[in-house]
Image (cartoon, helix red, strand yellow):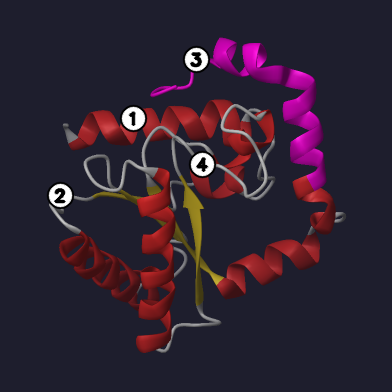
């Protein structure tokens, strides 16, 4: 799959779902200011993906937030099964610890088949974390803390997202025309 297509579809998802539905009230400024790094993985296996993750973590932490605020490591050809992806998240967290980046960077996860524990696959609440491709979102902890501190009601975001998606429903989500859906 061509990287430019993957990036364009990811941007479309951000515009229509993440920003359009206000699932993340912090996303719009970094998106409009072009402070998101989109890295499309070419890894053929988890070991290579882990090395790419290491490189992206190094780049993010060695670059000023005014240049790269956050990174999306998108891997369209790997970890397409959600359970495999979920298992890899544990490995990714171990890498943060190994690199002494716990508390500096956090990893949020998005996947086309994302499923919260205790939900059915088609439960609309899973769509809060559904993306066109398996994606690891690398966030600066300092930036997250600042955003949460300045945003009233930040703790209510997950509940509001569930409410938004429940009101929208699966048919409403499909009408958004999110790529990969």
Q: Earlier in the sequence, mark 4 or mark 1?
A: 1
Is 155 in front, or is 94? 94
**Taking 164 as reference, is 20 left or right?**
left
- Alpha carbon of mark 4 to alpha carbon of mark 1: how far? 21 Å
Question: Picture quarter containing residue 168?
Answer: top right
Residue 8: assigned label: 1
Q: Earlier in the sequence, mark 4 or mark 2?
A: 2
Query: How far is disc 4 from disc 3 in space, using C-alphas?
Result: 18 Å
Q: Nearer the viewer, mark 4 or mark 1?
A: 4
For marks 2 and 1, the one nearer the N-term is: 1
Report the residue at 36% width, 38% height from top. Answer: 133
What residue is shown with label 3?
177
Report the Cα–Cα distance between label 4 and label 2: 22 Å
Give the Cα separation between the discs numbered 3 and 2.
Answer: 26 Å
Q: Nearer the viewer, residue 48 or 39?
A: 48
Q: Quadrant of the image for the N terminus?
A: top left
Q: CA distance from mark 2 to mark 1?
A: 17 Å
Kind of element beneath mark 3:
loop
Region of the chain picked out in magenta, as a range: 159-181
Give residue 134's position: percent from left, percent from top. 37, 44
How many neighbours does mark 3 have within 10 angstroms: few (below 14), some (14-19), or many (20 or more)? Answer: few
At x 44% / y 83%, what residue is drawn? 101
CA neighbours of label 4 inside 10 A, class few (<14), some (14 to 19), many (20+): many
Q: Which secondary structure lies at badge 4?
A: loop
Depicted 64 relative to depicted 73: above or below: below
Mark 4 and mark 3 lie on one chain; the one further toward the N terminus is 4
Q: Which residue is mark 2?
A: 42
Residue at image mark 4: 114
Q: Is residue 163 magenta?
A: yes
Please identify, in this view, whether the residue under mark 2 or under mark 1 is nearer the observer. Answer: 2
Work out whether residue 67 can be spotted.
Answer: no
| Mark 3 or 1, nearer chain start | 1
């Amino acid at each position: 799959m061509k990287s430019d297509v993957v990036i364009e579809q990811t941007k479309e998802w951000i515009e229509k779902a993440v920003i359009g539905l206000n699932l993340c009230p912090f996303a719009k400024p970094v998106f409009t200011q072009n402070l998101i790094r989109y890295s499309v993985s070419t890894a053929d296996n988890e070991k290579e993906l882990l090395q790419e993750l290491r490189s992206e973590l190094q780049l993010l932490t060695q670059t000023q937030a005014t240049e790269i605020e956050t990174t999306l490591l998108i891997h369209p050809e790997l970890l397409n099964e959600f359970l495999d992806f979920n298992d890899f998240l544990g490995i990714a967290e171990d890498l943060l610890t190994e690199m002494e980046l716990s508390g500096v960077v956090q990893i949020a996860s998005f996947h086309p088949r994302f499923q919260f524990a205790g939900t059915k696959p088609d439960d609309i609440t899973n769509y809060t974390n559904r993306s066109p491709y398996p994606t690891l979102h690398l966030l600066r902890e300092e930036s997250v803390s600042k955003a949460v501190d300045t945003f009233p009601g930040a703790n209510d975001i997950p509940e509001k997202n569930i409410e938004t998606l429940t009101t929208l429903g699966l048919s409403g989500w499909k009408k958004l025309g999110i790529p990969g859906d």
